[in-house]
Amino acid sequence: MQQLNLIFIKNRRKELKISLQYMATKLGFKTGSSYLKYEQGLYAFKAEQLPILAHHLQCKITDFFAENVSDLETSSA
C-alpha cells in the first residue's frame, strides 16, 4: 500500500512560497495551524482533498505517494 508523502507536500508548498493559511483556506480549514496538523500527519488528508491540494501545489496526485516506507525515509534524510 502506498503512503502519502507528507515531506513532498510540505517541500512543494514551501518551494512555491505558499502559506499555511492559504492552503488552509483552499481546503476549507479555519486556520493555518489546522492545515499544519494534516501536513505533519497528525490528521489524514481525505481523498476528496487531494485534487485540490494537487491543483494548488501544481503537481499530479500521484506525486503525493511514495512507493514504500523506505522512499519516505530516504527523502527525509
Image (cartoon, rainbow, N blue to C red):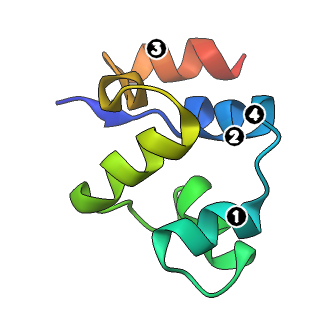
Bin the neighbour count of mark 2 within 10 Å (Cα to Cα): few under 14, some 14-19, many 20 and up: some
Q: Which residue is mark 2?
A: 13
Q: Position of residue 37 (x, y in %)?
A: 61, 68
- Quadrant in the rendering for residue 1: top left
The residues bearing labels 1 and 4 have C-alpha atoms spaced at a distance of 12 Å
- Quadrant in the rendering for residue 57: top right
Badge 3 marks a residue whose secondary structure is: helix
Q: Which residue is mark 4?
A: 16
Residue ranking furthest to the left: 1
Q: Which residue is mark 3?
A: 71
**Mark nearer the N terminus (3 vs 2):** 2
Q: Amino acid at mark 1?
A: Tyr
- Do labels 4 and 2 touch, CB within 8 Å? yes
Task: Name the disc covering residue 55, or none.
Answer: none
**Mark nearer the N terminus (1 vs 4):** 4
Drawn side of residue 2 relative to residue 43, left or right: left
The residue lying at 54 percent from left, 45 percent from top is: 56
Q: Position of residue 4 (x, y in %)?
A: 38, 38
Badge 2 marks a residue whose secondary structure is: helix
The residues bearing labels 3 and 1 have C-alpha atoms spaced at a distance of 28 Å
The residues bearing labels 4 and 2 have C-alpha atoms spaced at a distance of 5 Å
Bin the neighbour count of mark 4 within 10 Å (Cα to Cα): few under 14, some 14-19, many 20 and up: few
The residue lying at 66 percent from left, 31 percent from top is: 12
Q: Which residue is mark 1?
A: 22
Question: Looking at the figure, which quarter contains the C terminus?
Answer: top right
Q: Nearer the viewer, residue 63 or 74?
A: 63
**Mark nearer the N terminus (4 vs 3):** 4
Q: Amino acid at mark 4?
A: Leu
Q: Amino acid at mark 2?
A: Arg
Q: Position of residue 23 (x, y in %)?
A: 62, 61
The residues bearing labels 4 and 3 have C-alpha atoms spaced at a distance of 23 Å
